Image (cartoon, helix red, strand yellow):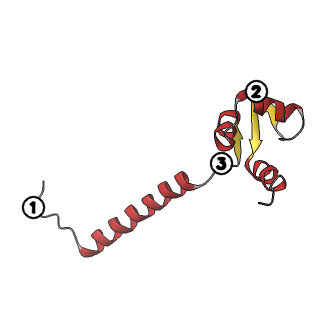
Amino acid sequence: MDKNNLVTVQDLQKMKEEIISEIALITEKTTTQKEWLRSAEVMKMLTLSTGTLQNHRINGKIPYTRIGGTLYYERKAILKVLNDNKRAA
């Protein structure tokens, strides 16, 4: 290492800002919710079995989109189904 290389306060400030920006990006990516969910995620979210989720699809209770062999469910549609079926205590 060259003894003539000095780290200035400005260098440290710039490095700090870069690190904070990177952490913010990582945090944003991990905390945003996915707009589209797969069957396993919906089953976990609603604590449903595979058969029950299939019955809800067949009966038209839960809207979905099929692309190839994969089923996708829009998160806001699932939340709407939950809210629409809310019962008073």
Cβ atoms at labels 2 and 3 below 8 Å apart: no
Residue picked out by circle 2: 51
Report the front residue among 75 and 29.
75
Give how far apart the Cα atoms at labels 2 and 3 are. Answer: 24 Å
- Give how far across and how far down residue 60 sits, in percent: 89, 38
User: In the image shown, does 56 or 74 lie closer to the viewer?
Assistant: 56
- In the image, taking residue 52 as reference, residue 25 lies left or right, namely left
Measured in 3D between alpha carbons, the distance from the residue under mark 1 to the one under mark 2, in whole angstroms, is: 69 Å
Estimate how packed mark 1 is, as few (under 14), some (14 to 19) or many (20 or more) residues with alpha carbons within 10 Å: few
Residue type indicated by callout 1: Lys
Residue 10 pos. (x, y %): 29, 74
Given the current orientation, which residue lies at the most extreme top position?
69
Q: Earlier in the sequence, mark 3 or mark 1?
A: 1
Q: Which mark is residue 34?
A: 3
Q: Is 31 placed above or below 61 here?
A: below
User: Going by the picture, which residue comes out furthest to the right?
Assistant: 59
- Residue 71 placement (x, y as % from top left): 76, 32
Task: Say which amino acid is labelled 2.
Answer: Gly
| Residue 3, numbered circle | 1
Total tally of numbered discs in the picture: 3
Q: Is residue 80 above or below residue 65?
A: below
> Residue at the location (88% across, 31% down)?
58
